[in-house]
Image (tube, grey):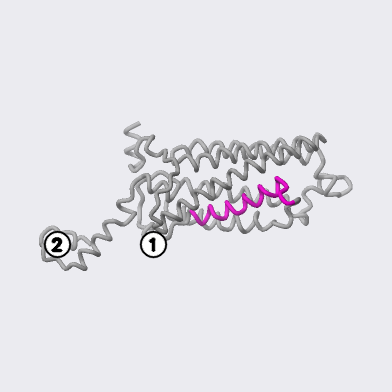
């Protein structure tokens, strides 16, 4: 409130309650949050924003990553065969609800709030789960379509099917590695999520290629290795969710994430100003 601001400088008899209210307005995160804290909460460099959406909406970033973490942990443990687990039909919900639902809702609100990079990241993870989940729905008959007899088992072991899925995962690896490059502007933990995700899908691509070639022993080993890498991804994701929730809930503990934003040129300037400095 401009009037309150002027009166706080012009008179010492200002009402105590009004002064307290003004102090809270001035310390609002949208105004005084440091680039390091902003990056920790939103996983994106702090840039100038139009509007006051951060004043009206809660931080959606941990919500989206919670869905991602639960789905990834489950997927990883099944790939590694923990407890004799095999097949993904029993947890098909992680591909359509647990992961994508929370990720897409969060991505929409990241867009509303002007958070470009987390919006892109959550959209990427959401469509990954959705597209990969399609392979785990028997009624669609995707694997069976690669068999001359209509057998899903025969189709899933065919060279054509496994080559197609393997190539698809290779492309995902390049996508995750691209995001890793840009995540290096945020923090170490977030960047490592993309690095290990890229490594995981490349290893899983190898598992599909080996299955198509009939080398099932190597395919199983690669599947287990891919699951282990995804477990690391999920653990890093869980860590960063805990960090964001601890900050939002004022836990009072400064948990490190390996801030990298201070190593780069300032981002809390307009694109026009950044262009002039380039």
Residue 255 position, x and y percent, is 43, 48
> CA gap, disc 1 to disc 2?
27 Å
**Of 144 and 95, which appears nearest the observer?**
95
Instruction: Point out the tag, 1 or 2, that comes first from the N-terminus.
Output: 2
Residue on which the image places disc 2? 7
Residue shown at the point (86%, 49%) measured from the top left:
151
Q: Quick one: which residue is furthest to the right in this view?
A: 149
Badge 2 local density, few (<14 within 10 Å), some, or many (20+)?
Answer: some
Magenta highlight range: 62-83
Q: Quadrant of the N terminus?
A: bottom left
Query: Which element is circle 2 on?
Result: helix
Q: Quick one: which residue is furthest to the top in this view?
A: 278
Q: Is residue 266 left or right of residue 229?
A: left
Query: Which element is circle 1 on?
Result: helix
Magenta highlight on residue 67: yes
- Name the magenta segment's main secondary structure: helix
Q: Is residue 137 left or right of residue 71?
A: right
Residue on which the image places disc 1? 56
Is 8 drawn above or below residue 238 in the view shown? below
The answer to which image quadrant residue 54 occupies is bottom left
The answer to which image quadrant residue 56 occupies is bottom left
Residue 201 position, x and y percent, is 65, 40
Residue 88 position, x and y percent, is 72, 52
Q: Is residue 248 left or right of residue 205?
A: left
**Of 14 and 46, which appears nearest the observer?**
14
Magenta highlight on residue 58: no
Badge 1 local density, few (<14 within 10 Å), some, or many (20+)?
Answer: few
Residue 243 position, x and y percent, is 46, 51
């Amino acid at each position: 409130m401009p009037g309150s601001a002027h009166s706080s400088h012009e008179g010492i008899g200002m009402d105590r309650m009004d002064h307290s209210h003004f102090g809270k307005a001035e310390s609002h995160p949208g105004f005084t949050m440091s680039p390091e804290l902003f990056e920790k909460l939103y996983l994106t460099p702090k840039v100038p924003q139009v509007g006051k959406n951060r004043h009206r909406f809660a931080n959606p970033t941990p919500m989206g990553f919670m869905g991602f973490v639960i789905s990834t942990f489950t997927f990883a443990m099944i790939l590694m065969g923990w407890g004799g687990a095999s097949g993904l039909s029993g947890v098909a919900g992680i591909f359509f609800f647990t992961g994508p639902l929370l990720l897409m809702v969060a991505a929409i609100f990241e867009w509303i709030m002007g958070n470009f990079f987390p919006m892109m990241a959550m959209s990427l993870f959401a469509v990954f789960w959705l597209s990969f989940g399609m392979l785990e729905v028997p009624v669609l008959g995707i694997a069976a379509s690669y068999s001359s007899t209509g057998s899903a088992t025969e189709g899933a072991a065919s060279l054509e099917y496994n080559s197609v899925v393997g190539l698809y995962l290779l492309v995902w690896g390049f996508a995750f590695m691209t995001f890793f490059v840009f995540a290096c502007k945020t923090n170490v933990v977030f960047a490592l999520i993309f690095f290990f995700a890229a490594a995981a899908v490349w290893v899983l691509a190898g598992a599909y290629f080996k299955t198509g070639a009939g080398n099932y022993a190597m395919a199983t080993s690669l599947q287990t290795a891919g699951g282990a890498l995804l477990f690391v991804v999920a653990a890093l994701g869980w860590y960063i969710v805990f960090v964001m929730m601890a900050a939002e809930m004022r836990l009072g503990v400064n948990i490190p994430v390996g801030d990298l934003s201070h190593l780069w040129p300032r981002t809390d300037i307009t694109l026009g100003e950044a262009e002039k400095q380039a």
